[in-house]
Image (cartoon, grey):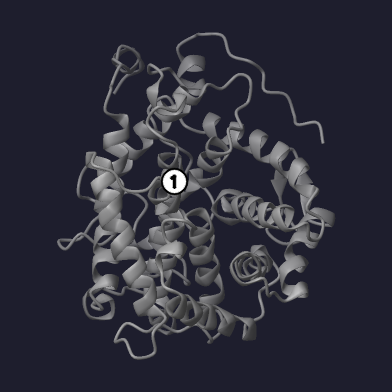
Amino acid sequence: MGFKSFFSKNFNSNNDRKIWVDTLSKIINPVLTNAANETLKKNMPVNAVKNERAKFAHLEAVGRTVCGIAPWLELGADNSYEGKLRAKYIELTTKGLVNICNPDSPDYLIFNQPYQPLVDSAHLVEGLLRAKTQLWDNINHDNQEMIVDALKQTRSIEPWINNWILFPSMIEAFLLETTGEYDEFRLMHGVNVYMNEWYCGDSYYGDGPNFHFDYYNSYVIHPMLTDILSVLRKHGIGEYTFLDAHLHRLRHYAGHLERLISPEGTYPVVGRSMLYRTAVFQALGQACLFGLYNEDVKPEQIRCALTSVIQNQFSDNANFDNDGWLRFGFNGNQPNVAEDYSNTGSMYLCTTGFLPLGLPEKDRFWSAPSAEWTSLKAWSGKDIDSNMYIKD
């Protein structure tokens, strides 16, 4: 599509939120329905680059799905189209969480073997913190204890020296919030390293001691630091005052992500884990949930930019198999995009690109008239701000 044709496009759509909800529902339905019915292991197709990773694929699918859908589910059930969908998925999710942690269930999953369960237990509990009322509080006490026991098994797994050091911190933050009990070193080590050693400047953290040109600041680092530090502040533990500086960085980093969305609604295919798709924008969505907007960026322009991305990536069936499961690829069936740690479950981190659904329909993000995003304005000759470097 040429620029002239593209710039003449009408950006007055009133159904952006429905596009998001229907797309998210299409992605998550196979995972949550099968987990609730104890048929996840039976029905989920498991494609894995390395065979030894296949046994962890189911936990990856569930943990990552819960992480992404949680803010939306936390809005709760009502009689609207959305509210009825949320009621459905709240019920499916809580049933599935019990099943995967129940040793007597055919869908009981592995939590204590190196190394992948550490990763996806962290994604799972991040989701439970994001939807504590609608998910965690809707699970009875005995089943809560069973889930906690499963999560504690991950304490036998040591993280790699990169973004993984945040995974024990995330799990311990959840245990602190829900039980009051935590392992102090595992809770604080990741936070302390990122606070004191791995900040690279201009809102970017290193994925380990060095900077990597990829999207792991959005896949893991910014979101988990935000959610861990929020728990620490609530309980007055550790260096929780770092949250203020971190949120300042999150706002600026989110501004970078918004500018990466092209006039056509695409984004650069760079770095590893590109099959995570819309998870590229998790940090941008989280900033929206926290109301963290740069002065030159309006919530509605972020909505329009992300809607364009979602439509480009999921509007047809290229990313799904005949049973609705995600296929290897960035946009379609592209198996060579996968790294050696990739499997079917890995791709469900894409749900974290839908975090702004946690904002109610009346929020400006959803209710304001459509607006052009930064690169669209820039390429059509309209004035934009310079977006100076962050002042740390």
Q: Is residue 384 left or right of residue 276?
A: right
User: Quick check: 33 above or below 332?
Assistant: below
User: Quick check: 329 above or below 289?
Assistant: below
What's under tag 1, amino acid-wise?
Gly
Please tell me which residue is depicted at 29% across the width and 87% down the height of the picture: 106
- Residue lying farthest bottom? 104
- Residue lying farthest front? 141
Q: Which of 101 and 164 is in front in this view?
A: 101
Q: Which of 13 and 173 is in front in this view?
A: 173
Q: Quadrant of the N terminus?
A: top left
- Residue lying farthest left? 322
- Quadrant hosting residue 361: top left
Residue 188 coordinates in the image, percent (x, y): 76, 66
The residue that mark 1 highlights is 353
Residue 341 coordinates in the image, percent (x, y): 48, 71
Where disc 1 sits, the SS reads helix
Residue 379 coordinates in the image, percent (x, y): 47, 16
Please tell me which residue is depicted at 31% across the width and 86% down the height of the picture: 105
Q: Is residue 194 left or right of residue 369?
A: right
Whether residue 50 is visible: no
Please tell me which residue is depicted at 32% across the width and 39% down the height of the picture: 20
Q: In which quarter of the image is the C terminus?
A: top right
Residue 191 coordinates in the image, percent (x, y): 75, 60
Q: Is residue 209 left or right of residue 25?
A: right
